[in-house]
Image (spheres, helix red, strand yellow):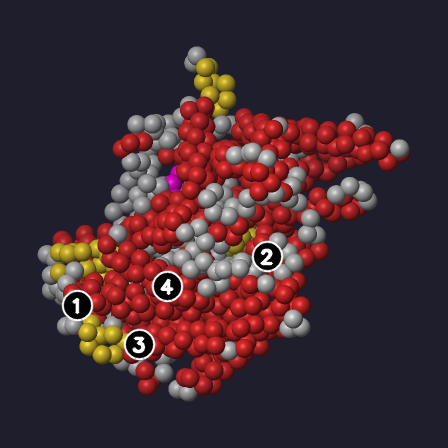
Amino acid sequence: MTPSTRLALAAACAAAFATSAHAQGNAPIKVGLMLPATGTFAALGDMIEKGFRLHVQEQGGKLAGREIQYFKVDDESDPSKATDNVNKLIKRDQVDVLVGTVHSGVALAMAKAAKESNTLLIVPNAGADAITGPMCGANIIRSSFSNWQPGYSTGVVAAQKGYKRAMTITWNYAAGAETVKGFREAFEKGGGQVIKDLNLPFPNVEFQALLTEIAAQKPDVVFAFFAGGGAVKFVKDYDAAGLKKTVPLFGSGFLTDGTLQAQGASAQGLFTTLHYADSLDIPKNNSFRKNFALAYKQNADVYAVQGYDAAQILSAGLNAVKGDMGKRDAMLAAMRKATVDSPRGKFTLSPAGNPVQDMYLREVKGENNEYRSVAVKALADPARGCKL
Amino acid sequence: MDLATFLVQCLNAVQYGLLLFLVASGLTLIFGIMGVINLAHGSFYMIGAYMAFVLAPWFGDWYLTKLLAGVILAAVFGYLLEWAFFSYLYQRDHLQQVLMTYALILVFEELRSLTVGNDVHGVQAPTWLAGGFKLGELMSYPWYRVFASVACIVLAVALYWVVNRTKLGMMIRAGASNRDMVRGLGIDIQRLYRIVFAGGVALAALAGMIAAPLSSVYPNMGGSVLIICFVVVVIGGIGSITGALIASLLVGFVDTFGKVFFAEFSGIGVYLLMAIILIWKPEGLMKQHGR
Amino acid sequence: MGAEHAATSASRFGRLVPLLGLAVLAALPAVLTPYTQDLVLKIAVFAIFALSLELLVGTTGLVSLGHAAFFGIGAYAAVLFTGGVGSLPAALAWLAGDGGAAPLLKLLALSVGFAALYALFVGALSLRTTGVYFIMVTLAFAQMAYFVFHDTKVGGGSDGIFLYAKPVLEIGGTTLIDLDRKSHFYYFTLGALAFTYGVLALVNRSRLGHALAGIRVNEQRMRAAGFRTYGYKLAAFVIAGALAGLAGFLVGVKDGAVNPELLSWHESGAVLLMIILGGIGSLRGAVLGAVAFTLLKELFQSEALLGPLAGHWQLTLGLTIIAFVALLPKGLIGLKQRLAGASHG
């Protein structure tokens, strides 16, 4: 071969080997953040990242003595590009830890890729039951919730309040279906009956037709799951249709999280359950919210907490092996056994990798979801289908 | 379904359809008169909605004044955009127009992200339109939705009047039928196009402003409106305002009743409608003559 | 005389370029990292997708904004008929396997077959319309397919479904091709690309191809000359759909995951963008466009190369597309012609 070809070949080989070799010891730990930077969930991705970085910052920029090097990929909340995008982090940047994402469909693809390449994956939001269900793995941990959890705890509260006939309304996608299933399970166990499930295609937000249907059926209570822009519109439409005064509305916490400024008066007095409440008066939450506001000049929300705790879980694992990621099994075991001192209160992880946490009943007051009581203590997702 | 519920659903269908009409009318004008496929039309709707949000603190309850201000701003913006960008697209084929306007969507979304951020924002309806009237036992119908429907009807009538009864409208219709002849008659077709384009943008932005209190503002809100808009324009017949009105109402009914009766298939309903109509009438319901 | 001589030797060299390209691609795995190999695979699959659309848009002059439907159907068929996931209607369920590695030829035939079948259905109905209405009807049919996978239980909804066992080709107990192995999949995809390119090159040279070109230039004249243009257009539509289904099969197996977004109008727009970038009217343009589009997106989203600007890739990509279409209306192929100072076309 010609000298120039040899040179090119050598350069290519060098590049290939350079990216694949990473020394242990004092080399930085590569954290791959796959979060939405554009599109409907961009704000959520931003908060998760800020929460994650805050914890690392609080530890002085190092976890277990090792620097953190961040790699970012915009997942565009598009599941069809998910495999390509996650491979950018796994194969191109060769990260040690994957953190992501918001959209469940994308997260499922990430979980599959993580299993195939045995990369550590920490999920800071996506609630798809399958991630800690049939797709569970020793290297997959979630720092947020499973869709079933907030649905179930709301169902418990609704049944306790004595309601007998409920209607559910949500988008026709996995997150909606799984949340409603949790609600139904608890509500029916508590003696109630779900008379009708309403849904509309995701992400359609023309609710009028279904609101009219609710008025026609006259249930005792309505359970709704929507998030983001859809949640804002639904709560406002529900109020504008006069239903807020006549049929009590309960929701999974996402109905009122991050959306209160936009929802305004329409959301006042709404009851939701979630694994976090802004006004939770515990030392850890107070210091967390203060540090977050100081660092970023905005108030933390549940997404920031989930990002923060993802970093805490990673910390726990790294500290147990003193930063040596080669001791893989010990690190994963330590992460699973950790008790996380979270702004939401202390929580542990189930064998399937999902938080076992207190679910709080919150009421909307002003621009905050205020803590009222504990709806369900130490709720564990049943992890149906997980073989761990 | 009892009669009362049925009537309310009809009301819902009409209100949704009328708002769609407002956005679609701008698109059918631009599409029909100037022959430009403009994928960025949803972005104008989005810009209108965000304008409603941004201008709200300055105008407070002076709602109609705010709408007027928004329309003027949007028209100026449209005029400049046509001059700077769209005028180069007339000579290009449909494919290139699709491409360039698709790229424009990306640019507008990113600019929106850089200037206003990615959060969801609510827009308050003016206090003199707050509340609603009782409709049956449990429901009440918000006054603001009534206002939105009425506004759309008023604008539809105004549009019809301008296009069919004024000199400007006559020039527009002539330009749609035979561009070269109009130029030959000494009418400045370039300025005409610029005015029509500005009008189309203003209509879409106005629709966004009116819809903002109902839908709130959030990233990518233009995307869902865009596709449905194209469906409406094509069903109605490109360039026909009356066609757009009929088509919007049809789509409103299919969407509303589809959701109630066929929840799983409601997404498909509108496209099925379009396919059936196009196979029956390949150029839309109200075929435009001369083009 | 000299110009003619230059032209024939140029065209002789020109005919070798695709073969050279194929040879280079075949040699690449020796020098590429696993990630860049995946990138090449992605480009190859998109190239097949773009080539299939080129037959419709470039050769026949039919602009379709719904081509992603056939791509997505091919992908979904590959996953659904391997079995174990989703929920096929009873009429089709007997064709599905049990979730283990499916027979390669059967799966390929089902993918391409169903894509072609839907193309036949869509083509038969939409070819009755013309111009911008045709564009919209193709979009409508693609949206319908999209919503079937997005809203109903067939495809597992908006989160998509996964392929857990990749197809194998077995003859008499010995496994000849196992698409789970990276090298096998790589060369299989290259083979598919070569096949697609070859088929389309042959079509372009054949009577069918000449008829399609004639239809593109002036359909009325073709009809006056006695050609049944509807039939020819339908044939082109079905072939294009089938080849898009092939690309879909490959993307489904490559990613091991399918999702309704594969059928969205954004995907249809993207493939249209690819052939315009490359230059409409040439097979090479389609491939070049796929390469350019994929690499451009990689570039603009790359944090390593663009730092904080990578988060605003929508802006950079959008402006680049506008500049491209404004300055290079004939695409990259047009650029080459301009640089070469070619006197033809």
Q: Distance from label 1 to label 4 (Cα)?
A: 24 Å
Observer-side mark, 3 or 4, equals 4
- Of labels 3 and 2, earlier in sequence is 2
Mark 3 highlights which residue? B146
Which residue is tagged 1? B4
Residue B96 higher or lower than B52, as above or below: above
Q: CA distance from mark 2 to mark 1?
A: 47 Å
The furthest residue to the top: C172
- Chain to which mark 1 belongs: B
Residue segment shown in magenta: C159-163
The residue that label 4 is drawn on is B246
**Pointer 1 with pointer 4, Cβ within 8 A:** no
- Disc 4, SS: helix
Relative to the observer, which residue lies in front, C256 or B69?
B69
Q: Can you identify the residue that label 2 sits on?
A: B97
Badge 2 or badge 4: first in the primary sequence? 2
Q: Name the amino acid type tagged 2.
A: Gln
| Tag 2 and tag 1, C-beta contact below 8 Å | no
Is C201 left, or right, of C164 in this rendering? right
Q: Identify which amino acid the numbered label 1 is placed on.
A: Ala
Residue at point 74%, 47% (across, down) = C335
Distance from disc 3 to disc 2, alpha carbons, whole Å, reads 37 Å
Q: Residues within 10 Å of mark 4 (few under 14, many from 20)?
A: many
From the top left corner, tell me how far across and down residue C122 is, in percent.
Answer: 43, 41
Q: Nearer the viewer, residue B255 or C249?
A: B255
Query: Residue at position x 56%, y 68% from top?
Result: B174
